Amino acid sequence: MKKNLCVRGWMFALSAMTLPLLAGCDAGKEPFLKASQAEESGDFKGAATLYQEVCAKKSPLCSSAKKREARMAIKAAWKAFGEGSYKEAKSVADAAAQSEDPVTADGAKAILANPDLVAGLAFEEALGQSDKTAQVQAMEGIAKEPTALSPKAKEWLDKNRPGILLAAAKAACVPKGAGSCAELAKRLASTHPESPEAKEAAGLLAENYKRLYPKIKDVENLLIQRVAVYEKAAKIEACKKFGGTDDTCAEAVTVQAPGLDYLEGFYKQRLELVEDPFYKAHFEKRWGRAANGEYDAEPWPKP
């Protein structure tokens, strides 16, 4: 019995002595150490390659290497996010969110839900827009939101919006132009009132208004006639309630007004000549009110 105890003791001692030797022979130990150092220094791509090498060498450290590589993706995503590479951050986080490691998956989902990442992605997308009008609208939307990207969007707008709006105004403030000269000039005046672009746009607006003034006055006069049509029809209906016929009431009512079909057709023709969508929309609203007998004179100043 004593001999057996001694043998077992000797074998135990031998096993304890050989453990460090076995660990020292582990081919994955060196790449694992180097991967940790690379991760610590922020070289996540290099670290990932080294962690994969640990498993390629069939090291006992493979399980730990896989877990560290998975969780390192969160660091990589945050790094890209902090550097303003929002698409890269999302790409890394999207992949990490599929991880079987719950810590990694939860961390990735937290990044993806971050409002600043959402705004950053929108900012990057806006920068790539070829449509300048859409680009300005996107940046204005980002600037309104309380995120870390709001100041960057405002800075971009201060630098780029005046020139973009002026270019659009130049295209609009001409016969059969694209867009509304009035809206663009007013927008520049409200967003960048002291800018040279706003002053130039104001001059373009004045010239365009001078050109359209006679056509605007024509449509204004047609509004008055539309009210007259309403009043004539109302008086005829009142007459008929007292027993008159269509013919007798039409003769009795002395309000001078053109036929409705003729007037509406003529109005559409004249409104088309106004061209600027801003003035057109203004008249369309007032035409609807005039059809109900309402008329508020618009003091169009003579240029």
Image (cartoon, rainbow, N blue to C red):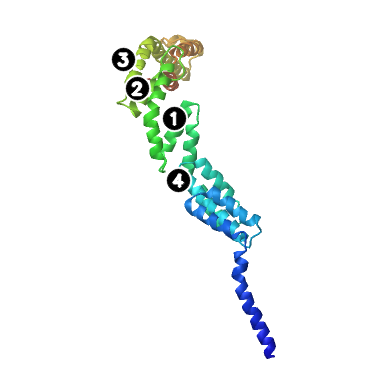
Q: Which is more N-terminal, label 3 or label 2?
A: 2
Residue that appears at 59% across and 48% down = 95
Q: Which residue is mark 2?
A: 197
Residue 101 picture location, percent across and down? 59, 57
* Element on which disc 2 rests: helix
Q: Which residue is mark 4?
A: 82
- As measured in the structure, the alpha-carbon distance from the residue carrying label 4 to the one carrying label 1 is 24 Å
- Nearest the camera: 236 or 297? 297
- As measured in the structure, the alpha-carbon distance from the residue carrying label 2 to the one carrying label 3 is 24 Å
Numbered mark located on residue 136 in the image = 1
Q: Label 2 neighbourhood size at 10 Å, few (<14), some (14-19), many (20+)?
A: many
Q: 52 above or below 275?
A: below
Camera-near label (4 vs 1) is 4
Which residue type does callout 4 highlight?
Gly
Which residue type does callout 1 highlight?
Val
Q: Which is more N-terminal, label 3 or label 1?
A: 1
Numbered mark located on residue 301 in the image = 3
